[in-house]
Image (spheres, grey):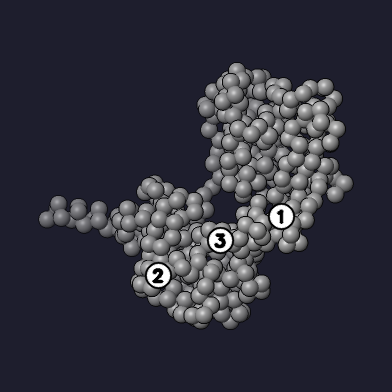
């Protein structure tokens, strides 16, 4: 790629390709570090754009080091851009401890920050600057297009991360900027209100089987009935793997976190540790007839390894492919476009609250560590407000007797 300077590709023993950015050999001999950086980006138009941008950043840092005749990695010159580079390249930066998909999302925001306000001096920033940036980052991509509040939120969150990292490095101007940012409250994007219902799940099941995608029916039922996240059911592909490492691999990625048949015991109790919280949960599948019905459709000899397998490939769905297939099935089932696959979890939690389930029980079922998190998934319905009204009215009538 001509727009990705320093990009190198190496072939693994299984024929897959791993990608690196490599510094010029002459500058490495002079002491430039890092000499190489492993790159993990999907082979998609968006992934290639991100890969090229990352290569250009690394190349620019190397050339700046060479031009200045320095013998250390690029330092902090007071600008947001230099702080961003430190955050991305310093080995002690929290950026490297982020989960791979979180790191990719943060990198998208860092690219926006560097391109738009990277030249700004941290020591001269004031509250109106941050407020203005937030507004600009949320503007429509083009006239007539919708505003992008989540883009603005993620970018300003990344600014906070950069400033906080600068504080840990002892930069006085970052202490000042951190104090200012701490006094500002930005408008929060509106929360989702869409709720998947049991009726939606039933329609998806019928359509999925009619279309030849029983995996979609099984996954949706498990998500809804057991209040599980998509990745805890379907799994995900993490970069940084090779065939020699074992497990289910594809190119330089490995399938992780999804349900496997061994998670379901002979007693039909599903035991799983939630990926995000590390919280263990148990579900008695015998109490979920819809889940049992879908499981019974899978022949016994095929109940080995991952539970959810793509009919097209015979292996777990690749990242985003499951959501794409689910959407096509949902469209044919007549499910509104406002209902997403991720709404299965919120729908399940809302249904539990509608039926008067105790907060602590909902928390345990959803694998949350506290009740407040479960409450955020509760997209309250008329049943809940009516139940409160009925209880209040009953109490008044009791007092008037």
Q: In which quarter of the image is residue 250?
A: bottom right
- Does residue 243 appear left or right of residue 44 in this picture? left
Of mark 3 and mark 1, the one earlier in the sequence is 1
Q: Quadrant of residue 266 in the image?
A: bottom left
In x, y percent, where is residue 319? 64, 60
- Comes first in the chain, label 3 or label 2: 3
Return the residue at label 3: 235
Camera-side residue of 135 and 25: 25
Is residue 263 depicted above or below 295 in this figure? above
Q: What residue occupies the far left of the structure in this picture?
A: 401
Q: Position of residue 348 (x, y in %)?
A: 43, 62
State the residue at coordinates (32%, 59%).
Answer: 357
Q: Which residue appears at 66% of the width and 19% of the height?
A: 124
Q: Nearer the viewer, residue 181 or 209?
A: 209
Single out the residue that lies furthest toward the right. Answer: 2
Tag 1 residue: 42
Q: How far apart are marks 3 and 2 (CA)?
A: 19 Å
Comparing labels 3 and 2, the label whose residue is closer to the camera? 2
The residue carrying mark 2 is: 265
Is 364 displayed left or right of 252 in the figure?
left
Q: Residues within 10 Å of mark 2 (few under 14, many from 20)?
A: few
Q: Which residue is drawn at 60% across and 18% down?
A: 172
Disc 1 packing (10 Å; few <14; some 14–19; many ≥20): some
Is residue 85 visible in the rendered image? The answer is: yes
In the image, residue 235 above or below residue 172: below
Nearer-the-camera pick, 81 or 278: 278
**Real-space Cα distance between discs 2 and 1?**
35 Å
Question: Residue 80's x, y, as percent?
Answer: 69, 28
Do residues under tags 2 and 1 come within 8 Å of each other at their CB atoms?
no
Task: Estimate how packed mark 3 is, as few (under 14), some (14 to 19) or many (20 or more) residues with alpha carbons within 10 Å.
Answer: many
Q: Residue 211 versus residue 95: which sits nearer the camera? A: 95
């Amino acid at each position: 790629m001509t727009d990705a300077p320093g990009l190198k590709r190496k072939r693994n023993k299984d024929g897959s390709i791993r990608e690196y950015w490599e510094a010029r050999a002459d500058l490495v001999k002079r002491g430039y570090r890092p000499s190489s950086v492993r790159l993990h980006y999907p082979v998609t138009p968006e992934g290639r754009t991100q890969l090229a941008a990352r290569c250009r950043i690394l190349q620019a840092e190397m050339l700046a080091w060479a031009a200045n005749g320095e013998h250390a990695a690029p330092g902090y010159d007071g600008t947001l851009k230099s702080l961003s580079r430190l955050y991305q390249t310093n080995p002690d930066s929290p950026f490297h401890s982020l989960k791979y998909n979180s790191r990719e999302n943060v990198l998208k925001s860092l690219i926006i920050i560097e391109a738009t306000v990277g030249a700004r001096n941290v020591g001269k920033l004031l509250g109106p600057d941050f407020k203005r940036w937030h507004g600009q980052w949320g503007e429509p991509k083009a006239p007539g297009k919708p505003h992008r509040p989540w883009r603005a939120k993620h970018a300003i969150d990344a600014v906070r991360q950069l400033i906080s990292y600068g504080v840990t490095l002892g930069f006085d101007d970052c202490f000042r900027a951190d104090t200012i940012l701490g006094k500002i409250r930005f408008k929060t994007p509106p929360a989702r209100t869409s709720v998947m219902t049991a009726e939606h799940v039933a329609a998806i099941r019928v359509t999925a089987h009619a279309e030849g995608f029983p995996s979609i029916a099984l996954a949706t039922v498990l998500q809804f009935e057991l209040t599980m996240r998509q990745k805890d059911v379907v799994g995900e592909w993490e970069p940084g793997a090779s065939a020699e490492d074992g497990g289910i691999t594809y190119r330089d990625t490995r399938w992780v976190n999804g349900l496997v048949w061994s998670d379901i015991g002979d007693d039909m109790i599903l035991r799983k540790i939630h990926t995000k919280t590390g919280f263990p949960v148990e579900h008695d599948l015998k109490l979920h007839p819809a889940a049992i019905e879908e499981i019974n459709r899978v022949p016994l000899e095929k109940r080995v390894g991952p539970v959810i397998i793509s009919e097209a490939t015979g292996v777990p769905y690749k990242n985003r492919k499951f959501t794409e297939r689910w959407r096509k099935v949902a469209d044919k089932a007549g499910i509104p476009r406002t209902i997403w696959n991720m709404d299965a979890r919120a729908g399940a939690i809302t249904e539990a609250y509608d039926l008067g389930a105790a907060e602590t029980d909902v928390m345990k079922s959803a694998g949350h560590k506290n009740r407040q998190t479960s409450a955020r998934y509760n997209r309250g319905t008329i049943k809940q407000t009516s139940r409160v009204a009925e209880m209040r009215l009953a109490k008044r009538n009791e007092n008037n007797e």
